[in-house]
Image: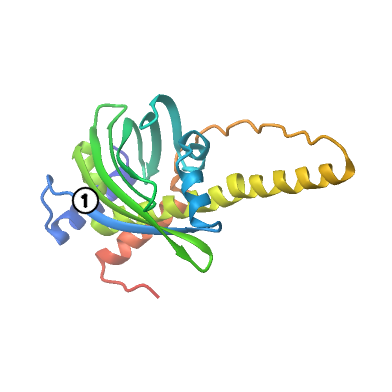
Amino acid sequence: MDGGEQLWDKIVEIRILDIGQRKDKAVEFDNEFEVPVPIDQAWDILMDIERIAPCVPGAELTEVVDDKTYKGKISVKLGPVALTFNGQTTFEELDTANHSAKLKAQGTDAKGRGGAHANVAFRMEPCDNGTKVIIDTSLQLSGAVAQYGRGVGMVKDLSQQIIGQFAENLENDVIGADSDTAANDHSNAKSGEAATVQDSPSPTAAPVQVGGMGLKVIWNAIKRLFGAKEP
């Protein structure tokens, strides 16, 4: 174990003692983001799992089992620790009329260091920008990987960074692409030319890196450790 790992483990250890959590206790947190389209359109977009999966940083969809069950993997590099979870997500409830859903996700670390189990509920509501998506998550970590996610604040920080990047990718790569295609179709129709739309190759999933996002998560953890307040 190098100096970086020892320092990181010490921070995590002190953080565990500070919050006094048991290893078998689930971490609960909320996230939200906005989608700049009407609610019915936002629902259709977010239910197209194959299309939006590349927008999740570090994630890769590996198999569509059926219309409610999906297999994939997600890679996260936090500090000196690189984790890759192979798992499955299943929609347990889908309420199209009320734009809400509940799903269960579970995965295991590729190197056998533990696993994660999450129950997630999300709902949509109209907002000035289009649609707000509200996500409630109950996450339980097990095995050795649990030590790297013991602090509730640390998990919240990481989840919010991932959600924020997902929302940005969704707007740029999916919604923006739809707008460009519609504009091209309209222009070509006016000029009497047939529109040609080329499919873009799906980007290779890269792990959520320590740079930028990861450093912010670590810095927030250190500030909480020493009682610093957010500006």
Measured as percent of width and height from the top left, residue 54 is found at 51, 37
Q: Quadrant of residue 189?
A: top right
Does residue 90 lie above or below 127 as drawn? above
Helix, strand or loop at mark 1: loop
Q: In the image, is residue 34 above or below residue 83?
A: below
Q: Nearer the viewer, residue 109 or 77?
A: 109
67, above or below 13, in the image? above
Quadrant assignment for the N terminus: top left
In the image, what residue occupies the spot 20% across and 57% down?
15
User: Looking at the rendering, which quadrant does residue 72 occupy?
Assistant: top left
Which residue occupies the foreground of this view, 172 or 39?
39
Q: Classify the position of the C terminus by image quarter.
A: bottom left
Image side of residue 226 versus residue 163, left or right: left
- Residue drawn at x 67%, y 31% as measured from the top left: 199
Residue at the right extreme?
A: 191
> Total of numbered circles in the picture?
1
Q: Give the colour scheme of this rendering.
A: rainbow
> Looking at the image, which residue sits at the far front?
97
Q: Mark 1 sits on what residue? A: 150
Which amino acid, by three-letter code, is at mark 1? Answer: Arg
Specify few, some or many for label 1: CA neighbours under 10 Å numbering under 14, 14-19, or 20 or more: many
Q: Position of residue 127 (x, y in %)?
A: 47, 66
Instruction: Identify the residue at horizontal 45%, vertical 32% (top origin).
Output: 60
Q: Position of residue 155 (x, y in %)?
A: 30, 53
Between 190 and 165, the one nearer to me in the picture:
190
Residue 106 position, x and y percent, is 27, 35
